[in-house]
Image: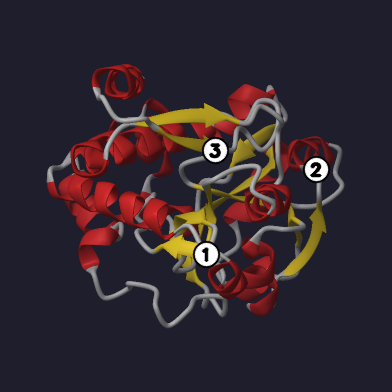
Amino acid sequence: MRYLLCLCLSGCLAISAAGAEPVVVRHVGPEDVGDIRKNYFIGLLHLTLEESASDVGPYEMKQIQAPMSQGRAFKSLQEGLVDVVWSMTSEERETNYHAIRIPLMQGLIGYRVLVIRKEDRFKFNAITEPEQLKTLLAYQGHDWPDTQILQANGYRLNASSWYKGLFKLLAQGGFDYFPRSVLEAWDELVALDQDSLMVEESILLHYPTAVYFFVRREDADLAERLRLGLRKAIDNGKFERLLYGFEPHRRALQAVDFKHRRIFQLHNPLLTAQTPLDDKSLWFDVEAYVKNHSR
């Protein structure tokens, strides 16, 4: 969190110290009340703009305060109400908007643990094959690419527009499990105060995907600035320090225990041919992580 604060302060200094008129970059806020994921992406946007400031000039960030679903955020982008959004990619999104094809979480958004009711713990521990899990019912957001990915792989799935309400519905027995990114699940349960729920301990879903920055297709200057800033942050190590130093991410990666989970691999029909899968420096390597963090 201290690193994020330093980034925010440095962004303000860049605005006041430079002589040129700052470029205003309007960005989305949280998807829902209690959504703590935004802090990492806002910090990363600060870092990206700061890294490019010496090349293209000063900036000013402005947050749109209204909570937005993914679908609403993209509509606001198209309408010119915001200038950048961050979200999981899909072919449709890359067709309609300009994607900066550098994964903002090294693909960790595609590693999914299952949020379940505590009383169902042993039922899930007994699942050893994907076909067993496919007999149970999951929920996802109605405008999330994950919904299409899971359905394409044969998983039983319903969708809802109310992200926060899905935790309550699960606790009430409305469905069986809620797949969440390994970087999201634990802190979401704490923030939403759902004592009857837990992160399942033995199963991990994985599909290749990425969260990107998206801008309007005609906003080539901002797209290039974001690409330049991200590349510089990757090359100088600041990107990884932010990704793995962000406290919720650090706690989550300690909790997930990759080594002792059964990984169910899924294909992702929404990826485009331009996805930089061959650039291994951009992606999380679970085998290397386990090796480097073995006790």
Task: List the residue tagged with mark 3.
Answer: 27
Task: List the residue tagged with mark 1.
Answer: 217
Residue farthest along the left direction in this orientation: 236
**Among the two numbered marks 1 and 3 on one chain, the one whose residue lies closer to the N terminus:** 3
Which disc is residue 162 wearing?
2
**Which is closer to the viewer, label 1 or label 2?**
1
Residue displayed at 66% across by 42% down:
81
Tell me the amino acid under the disc marked 3. Answer: His
| Image vertical order of residue 118 relative to residue 15, above or below | below
Q: Taking the image as drawn, is residue 243 in sight?
A: no
Which disc is residue 74 wearing?
none
Tell me the amino acid under the disc marked 1. Answer: Arg
List x then y, in percent, for residue 287.
25, 60
**Which is closer to the viewer, label 1 or label 3?**
1
In three-dimensional space, the C-alpha distance between marks 1 and 3, rounded to whole angstroms, equals: 16 Å
Residue displayed at 28% across by 24% down:
14
List x then y, in percent, for residue 275.
39, 73
Left or right relative to 79: residue 201: left
Left or right relative to 13: residue 91: right
Tell me the amino acid under the disc marked 2. Answer: Trp
List x then y, in percent, for residue 258.
37, 51
| Image vertical order of residue 177 relative to residue 155, above or below | above
Task: Label 3: state its secondary structure.
Answer: strand
Residue 159, quarter of the rendered image: bottom right
Pick the residue in front: 182 or 295: 182
Left or right relative to 165: residue 224: left
In three-dimensional space, the C-alpha distance between marks 1 and 2, rounded to whole angstroms, equals: 29 Å
Residue displayed at 65% across by 54% down:
74
